Image: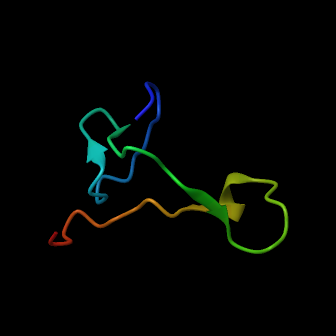
Amino acid sequence: MPHGVKCSVDSCHFWKEGNKCAAEKIQVNTYSEERAYKSGDTGCKTFRSSSDIL
């Protein structure tokens, strides 16, 4: 993951100490077909629960 990508969702499989994202890539989508104007209009599709069994 590029340096500086932060994530505070410590229940995510890709979360690493220091609020770092260790995913190889991330995907962020809007919640609707309309343009996003604030962060609450978007959602991380990369999230995978740290309790998921691979």
Q: Specify the quadrant of the image occupied by residue 21.
A: top left
Q: Position of residue 6 (x, y in %)?
A: 44, 37
- View extreme (left): residue: 53
Q: Front-most of 1 and 30?
A: 1
Vertical comparison of 40 with 22: above or below: below
- View extreme (top): residue: 3
Asked whether, in this view, residue 45 is left or right of residue 12, the answer is right
Image point 47% across, 34% down: which residue? 5
Vertical comparison of 50 with 7: above or below: below
Image point 66% across, 61% down: which residue? 42
Asked whether, in this view, residue 8 is left or right of residue 28, the answer is left
Asked whether, in this view, residue 14 is left or right of residue 31, the answer is left
Q: How many marks?
A: 0
Asked whether, in this view, residue 9 is left or right of residue 17, the answer is right
Q: How is the image coloured?
A: rainbow
Image point 37% across, 53% down: which residue? 9
Vertical comparison of 2 with 34: above or below: above
Q: Position of residue 29 (x, y in %)?
A: 64, 62
Q: Specify the quadrant of the image occupied by residue 36.
A: bottom right
Q: Position of residue 32 (x, y in %)?
A: 75, 74
Q: Position of residue 43 (x, y in %)?
A: 58, 63
Q: Front-most of 13 and 40?
A: 13
On-image quarter of the C terminus: bottom left
- View extreme (front): residue: 24
Image point 40% across, 35% down: which residue? 1
